[in-house]
Image (tube, grey):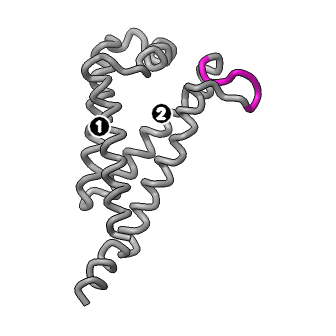
Amino acid sequence: MKNILWFGRCSLFVIFFWFGILKVIGISPAEPLVHRLFEQLLSGLISFELFNRLFGLFECLIGLSWLAPKFTRESLYVLLFHMTITFVPEIVLPEDTWQMWFAPTLVGQYIIKNLALISLGLLIYKSKESGLELLNVSQKSG
């Protein structure tokens, strides 16, 4: 179980850091969607280029936080906040996320799959809170 939980932590790190760094260096395939959402909600408050890079850094930090078990609770809260933001296009930009009722576009599917990331974050958090990570260590040494 300990190895599975670490694999989960590493998976969250890779996904968030990788997608974040793509935004930071300006080559994210999600950039057009993020830009359309930015125009709908934040236009005029900050430049898109700055926002996109800061958003990418934020994602990188989320990824890094999952590598530090001490910050699991905080990592989960930030992940849940971020995931809430990622679901906004499903409502605000339906032309980008839905082909028709109950048939998401590829972008919509990409967003919906974030439910799996939420589940993984909750699993890691609950495992840590219930002591499963520590239990496996003591079982191996005992």
Number of numbered callouts drawn: 2
Q: Amino acid at mark 1?
A: Phe
Residue 100 part of the magenta segment: yes
Quadrant housing residue 79: top left
Q: Amino acid at mark 2?
A: Ile
Residue 38 percent across, percent down from the top left: 44, 17
Q: Which residue is rendered at x = 29% and y = 16% of the image?
A: 26
In front: label 1 or label 2:
1
Observer-nearest residue: 15 or 74? 15
Residue 129 percent across, percent down from the top left: 38, 70
Which residue in the structure is indicated by mark 1? 17
Residue 85 percent across, percent down from the top left: 48, 33
User: How busy is the neighbourhood of tag 1: few (under 14 within 10 Å), some, or many (20 plus)?
Assistant: many
User: How busy is the neighbourhood of tag 2: few (under 14 within 10 Å), some, or many (20 plus)?
Assistant: few
The span picked out in magenta is 96-102
Q: Looking at the figure, which quarter contains the N terminus?
A: bottom left
User: Is residue 123 shown left or right of residue 53?
Assistant: right
- In whole angstroms, how far apart are the C-alphas of marks 1 and 2? 17 Å
| Kind of element beneath mark 1 | helix
Residue 122 percent across, percent down from the top left: 46, 57
User: Is residue 124 shown left or right of residue 71?
Assistant: right
Quadrant housing residue 142: bottom left
Which residue in the structure is indicated by mark 2? 85
Q: Is residue 102 above or below residue 51?
A: below
